[in-house]
Image (cartoon, rainbow, N blue to C red):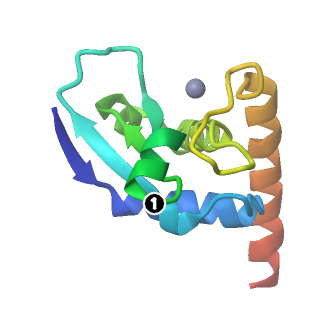
Amino acid sequence: MRYDYAPDLKNRLIEIVKTLDMNHIDLNRVECLRSFGSSTKRTIARCHTIGKVMQKGMKIPAFYTIEFLERFDKLNNEQQDKVIIHELLHIPKTFGGGFRQHDFVCEDNINNLHRNLQISRKNKSFFV
Ligand SMILES: [Zn+2]
């Protein structure tokens, strides 16, 4: 497996976090990586974190890494936005090192946020 920093995806994530006012996301403690060589064919992206015990032991606050697999770059822009929203929804409001599960990270919530994203983008560009 190879992992590269993905500053382009980090910028897209920042735009989405700011546009959707996801203020619980600490943008200094989220990083985006592209991974190459995974044998998982179905996975597009996944969210990683370090547990509370390791945070305490290392004396560092929570950190989240979102890994984008090769399949991600083949999706269209709208699908990619939805994947980014999906991964962001896994990060809980506490930003404490755990995850929200797929009962919350579901089609309905993703689609609602994606709709809000499109509306907010339109409204913003209207005033530019
Ligand atoms: Zn998920």
Tag 1's secondary structure?
loop
Q: Position of residue 3 (x, y in %)?
A: 21, 44
Does residue 43 sit above or below 60 in this rendering? Answer: above
Does residue 13 sit above or below 77 in this rendering? Answer: below
Residue drawn at (74%, 74%) of the image = 125
Q: Would residue 19 appear left or right of 82 to someone viewing this image?
A: right
Residue drawn at (60%, 63%) of the image = 26
Q: Nearer the viewer, residue 24 or 14?
A: 24
The residue that mark 1 highlights is 60
Q: Residue furthest bottom?
A: 128
Residue drawn at (26%, 38%) of the image = 35
The quarter of the image that holds ligand 1 is top right
Q: Mark 1: which amino acid?
A: Ile
Residue drawn at (63%, 48%) of the image = 96
Q: Position of residue 72 (x, y in %)?
A: 40, 35
Q: Is residue 65 visible?
A: no
Q: Position of residue 6 (x, y in %)?
A: 33, 56
Quadrant containing the C terminus is bottom right
Number of numbered discs overlaid on the protein picture: 1
Does residue 36 sit above or below 121 in this rendering? Answer: above
Q: Nearer the viewer, residue 126 or 73?
A: 73
Q: Would residue 127 appear left or right of 79 to someone viewing this image?
A: right
